[in-house]
Amino acid sequence: MTTDALTPHSSPSPSSTSHSSHAWTTRAVHAGRDDLAALGLHTPPIDLSTTYPSHDVLGEAARLDEFAAGHDDGGPPVYGRVANPTVRRFEDALAELEGAEAAVAFASGMAALSACLLAQVAAGKPHVVGVRPLYGTTDHLLDSGLLGTSVTWVSPEEATSAITDKTGLVIVESPANPTLGETDLRALAEACGPVPLLVDNTFATPVLQRPLTLGAGLVLHSATKFLGGHGDVMGGVIACSEELARSLRQVRFVTGAVLHPMAGYELLRGLATLPVRVRAASATAAELARRLADHPRVDRVHYPRLGGAMVAFETSADPVALISSVRLITPAVSLGSVDSLIQHPASLTHRIMDEVSRKEAGISPDLVRLSVGLEDVEDLWADLDGALTQALR
Ligand SMILES: *Cc1c(COP(=O)(O)O)cnc(C)c1O
């Protein structure tokens, strides 16, 4: 069904809708769906069109030029690589929840980050200032310079002095992966001056933290994690100003790293339950963090002051044996699903970093990372406690 394409909804300016007076959690349920009732629909239509008919060749050509320049007028997209009405719904909703003018969705979190880097290279600002630790593949992408960027690794206090006239982006993750270290985003954004600060907000989600309100220029999500929330959809998204969004749409148009419409549908559905999922998992994670802190085989627990569903801990037990001993929790990379996952960053997610960089980033070989899901806290504790007890060195 392509009702969306026939009835263009307005371009992203979510705060100007008549619904903006509703609470944030209410908007999480309704954002991206405000036009449905008028269309006679209850759930968002999924538009799988790869192309869109038009008898007005010249009009179509002019619109294509606009799309190529990064503008999205909200009308029929001409071609599936340009835009998609179902994906737009997710973008509009996420922009609203992050308090952004616009959002641009991609096939994965790494595709979203790649678009940011390519856009800054195209603008003649190939230098990145990176605050470690970052997601392992992000670290690798920056450290390898694979897309033509160069990086200076800094602590938040060193950001200002590392910025040059070629710096296009400062990148930080808070809480960070996998140490859950927190950065004062307001102070860092200030230290960046006119250079946009990109915050990877995958761990916190807009439920716990909205970096744009703290002065950040761009927010990145691996939508694969909490936004989707069920471990069955990959995606990435950047929330930012309309001006930055245009440069990202330009890159997406030529690289083709688009989010599939089915994924757009699933991610929009995920947003509706995001506040409930994140709050419930956070309450369980906070309790597990408390209990782990008292466990004789746990040396140190990392749990953000901000809260959240992620817990990391350093164990005196054998971390590899520990992970192979869990029964309810799934030993797997990734995070943010309804079910709990556990992994060993030094072996898996951060393996791609060299050992020295890992050490500098505070990623100990004894560190274990837990993504807490929606299971009962007592069942999760029994599984963790049992595995810790079994996993002697
Ligand atoms: C998973 C993840 C990414 C990369 O996202 P993909 O969807 O896997 O490409 C980036 N940052 C963080 C914090 C992540 O957890």
Image: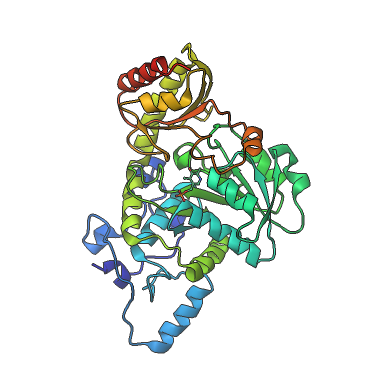
**Residue visible at 66% across and 34% down?**
360
In the picture, measured across the screen, residue 297 lies left or right of residue 169, that is left
**Residue 215 drawn above or below residue 34:** above
Quadrant assignment for the N terminus: bottom left
Locate residue 200: give its quadrant.
top right
**Residue visible at 39% across and 72% down?**
77
Position of residue 338 measured from the top left corner of the image (x, y, whole percent)? 32, 36
In the picture, measured across the screen, residue 87 lies left or right of residue 3, that is right
Position of residue 38 measured from the top left corner of the image (x, y, whole percent)? 26, 62
In the picture, measured across the screen, residue 69 lies left or right of residue 76, that is right
Q: Nearer the viewer, residue 238 or 100?
A: 238
Q: Nearer the viewer, residue 311 or 58?
A: 311
Locate residue 14: give its quadrant.
bottom left
Locate residue 36: give its quadrant.
bottom left
Seen as rendered, the residue at the extreme front is: 393
How was the colour assigned to the protein in this rendering? rainbow
**Residue visible at 44% across and 71% down?**
73
Asked whether residue 241 is in view, the answer is no
**Residue visible at 76% across and 58% down?**
165
Position of residue 135 measured from the top left corner of the image (x, y, whole percent)? 54, 43
Count of numbered tags: 0
Q: Nearer the viewer, residue 103 or 339?
A: 339
Position of residue 299 measured from the top left corner of the image (x, y, whole percent)? 54, 17
Asked whether residue 204 is in view, the answer is yes
Q: Nearer the viewer, residue 127 or 392?
A: 392
